Amino acid sequence: MATAASGHLLPSLVPLLFLLFLSIVSGDVVDDSRRQVIPHAYSSNFAQILGNLAVAKHNKGSEKRLDFCRTVMAEKVDNSTGTSGEYAIELFASPPGPDQKQQSFSATADVRGVINADGSVFVSEFVLLRFSRERFPRLVAKLKCYRI
């Protein structure tokens, strides 16, 4: 009886085990929105990024925002995979103080990269598809880069 019962469970477990194996081998990380998170996109120089955000939020011009997004996106692509494609980056900055609200910046861009002979990446084209700045209740600070 025990053998028959385990025989019925095994076929249903095989697809799950195979998916688990694929996720480990491929190394892809998927967040709550089910988008692939680029490895190494969590920046170790987060304080510098937050400083840049503090400056950028005072700049109202769209060209300043474009330059800011282009710089950050190029850094994230260069530090992650160095491949061309459409990327989305989210930067969330929570200022100190219990009464203040979080500034949220998100951008989506089409990035074309060229890999140089020495392995470094040159971003040859950057097209900002969307930029938004919103206010949200205080959340944990995070920086993510997605390939979409």
Image (spheres, rainbow, N blue to C red):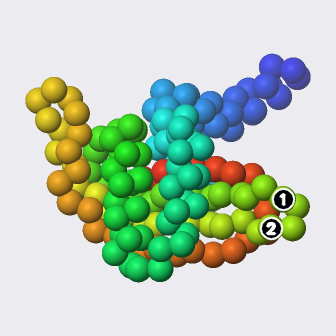
Q: Considering only vertical position in the picture, is 3 above or below 114?
A: above
Residue ranking furthest to the bottom = 61
Coordinates of residue 59 in the picture (x, y in percent): 47, 74
Residue shown at 38%/37% (left/top)?
79
Please name the residue that numbered disc 2 is placed on.
100
Give SS at disc 1. loop
**Residue type at numbered disc 2:** Gln
Residue shown at 87%/21% (left/top)?
2
20 with respect to 135 (left or right) = left
Residue shown at 47%/53% (left/top)?
146
Q: Considering only vertical position in the picture, is 49 above or below 105?
A: above
Coordinates of residue 102 in the picture (x, y in percent): 72, 65
Q: What whole-number distance in Å separates the C-alpha atoms at marks 2 and 1?
A: 6 Å
* Residue 3, picture quadrant: top right
Please name the residue that numbered disc 1 is placed on.
97
Using the image as rendered, state which of residue 1 and residue 22 is in the foreground: 22
Give SS at disc 2. loop
- Callout count: 2
**Residue type at numbered disc 1:** Gly
Coordinates of residue 89 in the picture (x, y in percent): 48, 58
* Residue 94, picture quadrant: bottom right
Using the image as rendered, state which of residue 146 and residue 119 is in the foreground: 119
Q: Are marks 2 and 1 in contact (CB under 8 Å)?
A: yes
Q: Can the viewer see residue 133? A: yes
Q: Bin the neighbour count of mark 2 within 10 Å (Cα to Cα): few under 14, some 14-19, many 20 and up.
A: few
* Residue 54, picture quadrant: bottom right
Coordinates of residue 67 in the picture (x, y in percent): 34, 64
